[in-house]
Amino acid sequence: MSHEISEHDVIVIGAGGAGLRAAIAAAELSPKLSIAVVSKVYPMRSHTVSAEGGAAAVTREYDNLDAHARDTIFGADFLADQDAVEAFVAEAPHELIQLEHWGCPWSRDADGRISVRSFGGMSVKRTLFAADKTGFHMLHALFQTSLKYDHIVRYDECFVTSLLVEDGRARGITNVNLYTGEVMVLAANAIVLCTGGGGRVFPFTTNAAIKTGDGMALAYRAGVPLKDMEFVQYHPTGLPGTGILITEASRSEGGWLKNKDGHRYLQDYGLGPPTDTPTQRKMELGPRDILSRCHMQEYQKGHTFEGPHGHYVHLDLRHLGQELIDRKLPFVRELVRNYVGIDPVYEPIPVRPVVHYMMGGVHTDMDGKTPLEGLYAAGETACVSINGANRLGSNSLTECLVFGARAGRNAAEYASGMGTPTSNPLAALARDEQHRLDSQFFKKEGGSERIAAIRTEMQHAMEEGAGIYRDASSMGATCEKLRELRERFSRIRLEDSSEVFNTERISALELDFMLDVADTIANGALLRKESRGSHTRTDFPSRDDENFLKHTLAYRTDEGPRLDYAPVKITRWQPEERKY
Amino acid sequence: MMATRPDPAGLYHPAMPATWWLRKRSYFLFMLRELSSVFIAGFLVVLLLQIAQISSGEDARAAFSAMLRSPGWILFHGVALAFAVYHSVTWFYTTSIVMPLRVRGRELPRWLFTALNIGAWAGVSLVILILYLALPASA
Amino acid sequence: MSERTITLDVTRYRPHQEAVPTVQSYAIPFPDDWVVLDALNHIKDQVDGSLSYRWSCRMGVCGSCGMMVNGEPKLSCAVFLRDYFPRAIRVEPLSNFPVIRDLVIDMSGFLDKLKSVKPWIIREQEKPLSEGEYLQSPRELDAYQHFSQCINCMLCYAACPVFGLDSGFVGPAAIALGYRYNLDSRDHGTAERREVLGDHEGIWQCTFVGECSVVCPKHVDPAAAIQRVKVDTAKDWILSLVMPWGQR
Ligand SMILES: Cc1cc2nc3c(=O)[nH]c(=O)nc-3n(C[C@H](O)[C@H](O)[C@H](O)COP(=O)(O)OP(=O)(O)OC[C@H]3O[C@@H](n4cnc5c(N)ncnc54)[C@H](O)[C@@H]3O)c2cc1C
Ligand code: SF4
Ligand code: FES
């Protein structure tokens, strides 16, 4: 069987905040370039749509770039690359203004300027927001603006299954067209991965169903290392049961966290003193990793509530009043009313820590370049790294813009220098991929394992071994379990043999990717024998700069990940103890 | 530009049944509003004829008036009145949507705006009624 | 938590295999806090892996999961089984759209319409980024903000009989989004958008049934947008008759 090959200059995989920004940047470089945007869901369904709280950048006189850089590096527990952080904070204001020019309905002050709010771990108010639907408005503004460019060609509802690598260069992709079930082949001189995170490897997450780490696995299988995968952020305030996020903005607007005795317990963990109105970086505005650990300690002390979905504490907004809640946190009110059945104006919200964000991802440099020539990555799927061991809230939307634009521009420049993409070598590669897909998924006969069963077991193993608190024995057990699941995965049963909109196949392909991603997280965690940022080991409770002030790099081998390490770039901020 | 679209051959196109407007109360009320215009138009035609009769002499006018007193015509006018009221009320509600009233930067609640409109309408009708009753029935 | 069992009658359609959709019933045990989408996920994971539907965020913001639930267009992640119990629930693909498979509708037509209303800022003159943001007062923001809340969930199209009778109608969400930009103090594109909005497939198709605004989960009120575009367009038309020289 031979495939028709569509040629483009640049392929962007993913149409969330990072992907659309990359596509527009590439499109603006030259109208002669043909930019393909491939996404497994319609662009406006991408997970960026769920982001609530805001996007950080220095836009006020009282603020400065060094302060933003320092907060970010400090929050990252010094695992961030400082040159990347400096570039990030420097370009952030420009990118957010650009989005304003593209129509994003930012919330405004009385004088007409874009409003800013406090956010966890930030030393001043610098987070721009559009009520509490910032990601939604950013994504729609980007998507609607992207419609302007006729040379952006969208492949909507196409699931990418592999990167085609020839002569050490990324030259194309294969993807399943959901409408027909056929495998399509796209060729290009440069490819940008913007496929988002993979929170769905855990059972309880704020992440949407599509966040299955596909891009990380795609790169990993193409020989690109994944960086710092062991760092997984728990957000302290998710709704029990669903995992729906209650944004940090609810705390920056003044919400309080209280245990079952009505006590603002964070003061007992060195985050005090409690004040009535929020203080930057203190109490409820502490960083997420620390707040999540405080919750777990309260639980161990028996100070949390117990409900049908486990332990929880209260996030109390009542004192903020209806007017403020409706103006600044309308979505929080809507979500809590719909999904908990209470009104936060009158009752405290039950919350607990929930998996939220992956600091790790595809290893890139500051230009979004990966070690594989022609392959770029940006957004949550990439690890530049500016987030190090713990991301500060509201940095990642900005990261999508800054590094999305960088990756898109650099990919387009690289592609323009390469002439027309050649598709000759791809036919054979595509045939191999078709064969793999047919034998493992599409034409697979028999099998006994349910996709959902393996997925659920993987998720629980991850929570057990790679949750908020980790130790060698539980992580070892998780790694073992993942090996077992990988083996069982080869025996999955597929019930749906039709070609049109076969979502069962997609679930199987996603699970295949997730098993790889989970493996890198668990193995990375096992070998990092220290506690840093979100990675907390009960058997190695302190930070160890001597041995572990370095990035983990996981390379794929048939026997599982092979781990290597790379130095962290320090420019002006020497590591010090991280105390708030 | 979109490169991928569903295969038209496999699509199922549901047909709208002719009775679609019976499926939902709101659709039915909408159809009633559309229908109301027929009755209002009918009433206006009768009114125009009545005015035309004025110039055709006393006898013709009396005969026409007598005809209008038949139960059928009274029923017609009753129904037309009901439709006119229905149409007017929904029209006033519509106005509140089309031209919202803003008071100190906030949109006035629609029911309130509608109620104000209806109140004003009732007021004007009342004034006309009073004038009608107060003026000597000379003609 | 108490578990009860509810019946879901789900529309199935397998293209190329059957000419018309059929209905399949599933009895689903459910806890109190399950939404319709949870039941579908349960079916897919445990009972019948071949059921197809779209979903992602499960928090009412991505707009993927619109379906007819007992004849009403709903986000299936936002309606609770308990509110229908003990009656059975009928789950169908959104009305008025071609069906690709099971509960998956073809919405590519909407994406064409969306593009046609030019939903982006059109400026007579761009301000360089170095000069910062366009100032916009909270009141100016307020003027268009609720029309910008559209999640493209297509519920309004499923509720619109005009769209059901004529699939070429630009329709509620796309018109509301075009109007959203007209109202934005940063935008100068009203005249350009009039070509599409004022076209015979645009606002004048609307007979104001008003259901789009009733079913909209985000209170966008597209019906109001359409009627206001009508008023604006008519006003401009009359002005152009009275003062033909005053036109831009
Ligand atoms: C509930 C929530 C709230 C958040 N709030 C904030 C906040 O307030 N501030 C902040 O800074 N950050 C926030 N974040 C984090 C931030 O939203 C994300 O990190 C960011 O949106 C990721 O964007 P992205 O473009 O990298 O990926 P996404 O938006 O996830 O997009 C991924 C894209 O890749 C495509 N894709 C994936 N796999 C494939 C495949 N195999 N084939 C084809 N296409 C594929 C998808 O279709 C999609 O278009 C929040 C996150 C969550 C979960
Ligand atoms: S206007 Fe409302 S109902 Fe229509 S697509 Fe937008 S959000 Fe959905
Ligand atoms: S799943 Fe996103 S709106 Fe329902």
Image (tube, helix red, strand yellow):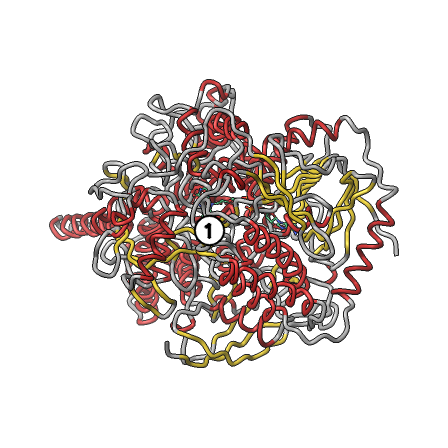
Q: Quadrant of the N terminus of chain C?
A: bottom left
Classify A196 as above or below C234.
below
Left or right: residue B19 versus residue A280 is right
The secondary element bearing badge 1 is classed as loop
Q: Residue at x 36, y 70 (%)?
A: A308
Residue at image location 59% in from the left, 35% down from the top: A567
Q: Which residue is mark 1?
A: A540
- Amino acid type, callout 1: Phe
Q: Determine whether C23 is above or below A182 in the image.
A: below
**Residue in front for this viewpoint, A356 or C162:** A356
Q: Is residue A84 left or right of residue B67?
A: right
User: What is the quadrant of residue A491 in the picture?
Assistant: bottom right
Q: Where residue C10 sits in the image (x, y, percent)? A: 56, 73
Ligand 1 is within 8 Å of the C-beta of the residue at disc 1: no
| Viewer can see residue C119 | no
Q: Name the residue rendered at 12%, 49% in the picture.
A: B136
- The image shows residue A516, relative to residue A328, as above or below, that is below
The image quadrant of residue A510 is: bottom right
Residue C98 % position (x, y): 63, 60
Which residue sits at x=20%, y=42%? A276
- In the picture provided, is A272 more to the left or to the right than C90? left
